[in-house]
Amino acid sequence: MRRLPVPGHDLVGIRADNPGPFTLAGTNSWIVGRTPAWVVDPGPARSEHVEALVSEIDQRGGLGGIALTHDHVDHSEAVPVLQSRFPGTPLAAARSEVDVRLEESSVFGPLEAVSTPGHAPDHLAFITGTAALTGDAVLGEGSVFIWPGPGALASYLAALTELRARELTVICPGHGPLVRDPAAKLDEYIAHRLERERRLIAALDAGRRGVDEILEEVWSDAPAALRPAAAVTLAAHLDKLADEGRLPDGVERPPVAL
Ligand SMILES: [Zn+2]
């Protein structure tokens, strides 16, 4: 359990103790404002974590609503227990059974939704003041996997570019530390994806067609634990090249499962 204060902003992160290759040091839940406070991504349903959220919310004068950046379990599992502690609290997200369905530009309390598909098709980032709560669209360190779907990677790049155009002073990610230089981080993310694509095209130009040989060459830096995620992201990259008419024949498509 760790508190992540955000100097200059009336918001605080509470990090859950669920470390792992995808969650880094743990999931960051964010609590925004006061009387009432608003929660973005309650995180895993671990009692220590939930109690820390409840205590912070109580100090901030109650809970106005719960918003999800996306419905992956490491971000959403604590929703029911938090709602049971604050009965009647509305849940807002871009899909599934929610009280408030969000989309691009929706406003929920102090949060403005920005559609950021890529890691998940329902993914949103939230802007509050000059802070962006980015869930798994942008992490505090490392990169994210992209879930293939129609236009997933192109939409993701467009979303990063839209965030880059905002006046931001801090990124509060779903995992990892605060990002103090949002412009530099977003530039890094965009450059990272384009560099992967450049390496992928080079591998295809060199005649690579099998998943393993492509991963070996293009994701040589990915640790073994992240290979399945790299394979999923490879599928998204292949889809983008196919959409653009740039995918050669005979390329093996990785099975998409994690
Ligand atoms: Zn996550």
Image: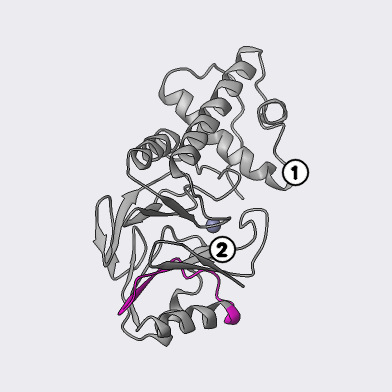
- Secondary structure under tag 1 reads helix
Residue 236 locus on image (x, y percent): 51, 35
- Residue at image point 57% right, 55% down: 177
In the current view of this chain or complex, which residue is farthest to the front? Answer: 8
256 or 27, which lies in front?
27
- Residue at image point 38% right, 55% down: 131
**Magenta span of residues:** 31-48
Near mark 1 (Cα within 10 A), the count class, few <14, some 14-19 or many ≥20, is few
Q: Looking at the figure, which quarter contains the N terminus?
A: bottom right
111 or 150, which lies in front?
111
Q: Is residue 85 magenta?
A: no
Q: Is residue 42 magenta?
A: yes
- Residue at image point 35% right, 84% down: 61
Label 1 with label 2: CB-CB less than 8 Å: no
Find disc 1 in the rendering and name its residue: 224
The amino acid marked with disc number 1 is Ala
Near mark 2 (Cα within 10 A), the count class, few <14, some 14-19 or many ≥20, is many
Ligand 1 is within 8 Å of the C-beta of the residue at disc 2: yes
In this image, 186 relative to 256: left or right? Answer: left
Residue 27, disc: 2
Residue 95 locus on image (x, y percent): 35, 59
